[in-house]
């Protein structure tokens, strides 16, 4: 029997939190307040500058992630950070292909290389996909499929379950309302169908997350009725009580 994977809640701090003291306080607060959440993996993704300080604060309970890596391994790439730089900081997750980076020119091909770099360094890629808008003809479904096909082109059948796929409709990111759980379920099924087409029906599925306007009030319904394995959270990951509220509600799901 396949092992049931734990749910996962990932906080993307983006370009927020401006002192080490604040960063450490936030992670310590999350650790303390989520102590009873036994069924949920928790990940924080701060800006790179806090990794050295957070390395000793993160634990088995609250893991460390980052928001990007570079697509090559080493060399003359001014300003870039390689996956290899991160292993010394206990980084175990990396968000790849977030729509805010795609909007600034990141391509599917570059994203696919980054996913390979992450896996080579035993860092779990959190591969973001999502459409900007929806049309009645269902064109957005082919768009999602092509993001999956190109993004995962360097990932083998053995590796696919080591990837986390985060479905984030761009129109729900930063919005006041999240997608409803019925639509989340439809997309989770569609992503599974695409992955089966790519890897065969016996494939071990990656964890599939939803992201976009998640908060403590809607988190449980989205995960439970949307049949996803967890959540990628932006704004609500910046305050202990809000992020922990999400974690606790997800953790209640059987
Ligand atoms: C995001 O940017 O990935 C995100 C989900 O943001 P928010 O939760 O703020 O909508």
Image (cartoon, rainbow, N blue to C red):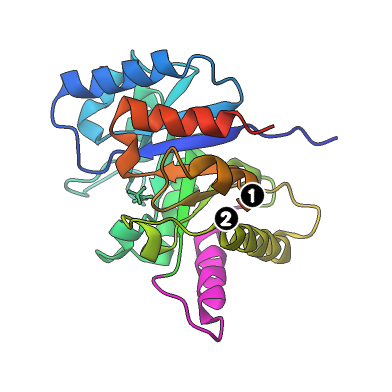
- Classify residue 185 by image quadrant: bottom right
- In the image as oriented, which residue stretches furthest toward the right? 1
Badge 1: few (under 14), some or many (20 or more) residues near its Cα, within 10 Å? Answer: some
Task: Report the front residue among 65 and 135.
Answer: 135
Give, as a single range, the part of the protein colored magenta.
132-155
Dot 1 beta carbon under 8 Å from ligand 1: no
Q: Residue furthest bottom?
A: 137
* Disc marking residue 225: 1
Tell whether position 141 is magenta.
yes
Q: Is residue 241 visible?
A: yes
Q: Nearer the viewer, residue 103 or 169?
A: 169
Residues at marks 1 and 2, CA–CA distance in whole angstroms? 6 Å
Q: Horizontal and vertical percent for residue 135?
A: 48, 82
Residue 240 in picture, x, y percent from top left: 33, 25
Q: Secondary structure at mark 2?
A: helix
| Residue at x 28%, y 22% (from the top left corner) | 26
Question: Where residue 106 sits in the image (x, y, percent)?
Answer: 32, 63
Q: How many marks?
A: 2
Q: Which residue is mark 2?
A: 181
Pick whichever of labels 1 and 2 is earlier in the sequence.
2
Label pair 1/2, CB-CB below 8 angstroms: yes
Name the element at disc 1.
helix
Reply above or below: 239 against 80. above
Left or right: 23 in relation to 130 = left
Residue at 42% from the left image edge and 65% from the top image edge: 108
């Amino acid at each position: 029997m396949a092992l049931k994977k734990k749910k996962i809640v990932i906080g993307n701090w983006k370009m927020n939190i401006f002192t080490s003291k604040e960063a450490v306080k936030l992670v310590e607060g999350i650790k303390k307040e989520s102590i009873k959440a036994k069924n949920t993996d928790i990940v924080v993704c701060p800006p790179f500058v806090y990794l050295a300080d957070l390395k000793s604060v993160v634990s088995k309970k609250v893991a460390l992630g980052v928001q990007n890596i570079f697509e090559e391994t080493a060399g003359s790439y001014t300003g870039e950070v390689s996956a290899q730089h991160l292993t010394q900081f206990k980084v175990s997750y990396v968000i790849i292909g977030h729509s805010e980076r795609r909007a600034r020119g990141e391509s599917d091909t570059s994203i696919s290389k980054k996913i390979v770099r992450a896996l080579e360094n035993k860092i779990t890629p959190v591969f973001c996909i999502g459409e900007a808008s929806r049309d009645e003809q269902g064109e957005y479904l082919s768009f999602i499929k092509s993001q999956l096909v190109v993004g995962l082109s360097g990932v083998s059948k053995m590796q696919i379950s080591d990837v986390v796929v985060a479905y984030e409709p761009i129109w729900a990111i930063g919005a006041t309302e999240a997608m409803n759980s019925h639509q989340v379920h439809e997309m989770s099924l569609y992503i599974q169908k695409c992955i089966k087409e790519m890897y065969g029906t016996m494939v071990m599925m990656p964890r599939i997350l939803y992201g976009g306007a998640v908060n403590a009030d809607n988190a449980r319904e989205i995960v439970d009725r949307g049949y996803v394995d967890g959540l990628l959270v932006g704004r609500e990951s910046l305050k202990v009580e809000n992020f922990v509220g999400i974690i606790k509600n997800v953790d209640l799901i059987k």
